[in-house]
Amino acid sequence: MNSARISELLKMRPQSSLCWGVYAASTQGKAKPDLGVAIAKKLATRAVDRNRLKRMIRELVWAAQADTLKKDVVVKLKKPIGRETKGRLRKKEKEILRSQFLELI
């Protein structure tokens, strides 16, 4: 998905939970549906945590919509992670983020 399409989707009204925003729209023309994940460095300071969250989101979206994905989707983190753990993503917080995301899809 190119940056113009991501910007276009981010202008739409998202489905959101406490920590996530999910922007979805039908694909343009006969293009293949795509997934974009936006996790800002300010919200997840460690690259390890950003990559772990991106991997988790990809896994959940493709598992939930394996054959039926007909939309372009952009997922955006809204709140900082690791407030109690000095910026590190721990298992407890990861499970909370996972459950919140599953409620949206």
Image (cartoon, rainbow, N blue to C red):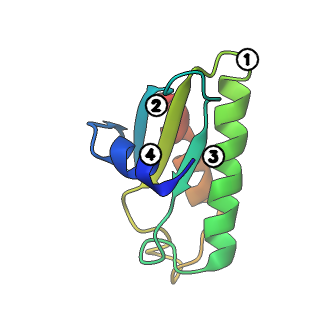
Residue 46 percent location from the top left of the image: 60, 80
What's the amino acid at mark 4? Arg
How far, Cα to Cα, is label 2 from label 1? 18 Å
How far, Cα to Cα, is label 1 from label 4? 22 Å
Which dot marks residue 104?
A: 2
Residue under pointer 1: 67
Crowd around label 2: few <14 · some 14–19 · many ≥20 (10 Å): few
SS state under label 4: helix
User: Who comes first in sequence, dot 2 or dot 3?
Assistant: 3
Which dot marks residue 5?
A: 4
Residue 66 percent location from the top left of the image: 73, 23
Q: Is residue 16 left or right of residue 72?
A: left
Between circles 2 and 4, the one closer to the viewer is 4
Query: Are the residues tagged 2 and 4 within 8 Å (C-beta)?
Result: no
Q: Can you see residue 72? A: yes
Crowd around label 1: few <14 · some 14–19 · many ≥20 (10 Å): few
SS state under label 2: helix
How far, Cα to Cα, is label 3 from label 1? 17 Å
